[in-house]
Image (cartoon, rainbow, N blue to C red):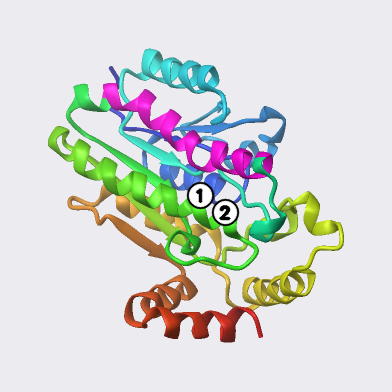
Amino acid sequence: MTDQKVAVVTGSSSGIGLETAIHFAKNGFKTYATMRNLGKCDAIKSQSENLPIEILQLDVTDDESVKKAINTIIEKEGRIDVLVNNAGYGIIGAVEDLSSEEVKNQFDTNVFGVFRTIREVLPTMRKQKNGRIITISSIAGFMGMPVFGAYASSKFAVEGLMESLRHEVSQFGIHACVVEPGAIKTGIMETMPVAKKSTENSAYTDLSQALGKAMGDMVKNHSSPPSVVAEAVFEAATSENPETRYTAGEDAKMIKQARTTKSDKEFEEFVLTNFMS
């Protein structure tokens, strides 16, 4: 068993996952940067020379892929100290426009993918009597956004899952935390899939366009670099007494404060003013 601490990061081909994997490796962790498609590993390869990083295939929507990857790491290292559940995506579409299949696919990655990785690492962490499980949530994990119903509901689910997990595993010396980013410069808005019905004379086209413009302006003018999220994840992984939730980005902190200090009606007005006008 190696003495070097081991971190596993899902969805490491770009954005937050890539930045997080690099950050852990630069700070002495043997880091497994996992991704569904190894054809997208060029970005992390170009930044990880001379760093303790290994790239590994792991598809969070596939039970066998998750089991194989985690077993490979355990057999080689004998330990897993940190799991970062980062793999995820968001689909754009009003609730009425979303098909059941589109919502199932959203949850299969964002929610069931988290269940799969947690189940595989926990036996090792319990045996070690320590470990950190950190899941990337979102500001959408504590506020509903128009045309982001599938994404927001998946992140609300993750928040409940991780809070429940935190209670269950603390007795084994394991901590579970979430990190809630705001707008991050990752290009995610340009690659988000759109519900099929949303492109077919949807009754919500004007709403979608208004929100898209507001979100685009936020990303352009108020977003944070992925390093802000990576630093919050690393704090959750290394703090002696980690918090349940970490908010990443000034916009996320502002929105979180509004959500926790305003009434539901006041917060609806806040959303209308800031995202839909």
Farthest residue, direction left: 171
Quadrant into which the C terminus falls: bottom right
Secondary structure of residue under mark 1: helix
The answer to whether residue 105 is left or right of residue 153 is: right
Q: Residue 80: say if magenta.
A: no
Q: Amino acid at mark 2?
A: Tyr
Numbered circle sitting on residue 154: 1
Secondary structure of residue under mark 2: helix
Q: Residue 105: say if magenta.
A: yes
The answer to whether residue 264 is left or right of residue 127 is: right
In depth, the one of 160 and 63 nearer the eye is: 160
Q: Are marks 1 and 2 in contact (CB under 8 Å)?
A: yes
- What kind of secondary structure does the magenta stretch mostly adopt? helix
Which residue is at a point 43% across and 78% down the rendered structure image?
Answer: 254
Identify whether 124 is placed above or below 194.
Answer: above
Q: Amino acid at mark 1?
A: Ser
Magenta-highlighted residues: 101-124
Q: Can residue 11 be seen from the camera position used here?
A: no
Quadrant into which the N terminus falls: top left
Which residue is at a point 20% across and 21% down the rendered structure image?
Answer: 127
Residue 234 location, x and y as percent? Answer: 36, 50
Q: Dot 2 corresponds to which residue?
A: 151
Q: Residues within 10 Å of mark 2 (few under 14, many from 20)?
A: many
Q: Can residue 79 be seen from the camera position used here?
A: yes
The answer to whether residue 65 is left or right of residue 198 is: left
Identify whether 129 is placed above or below 14.
Answer: above
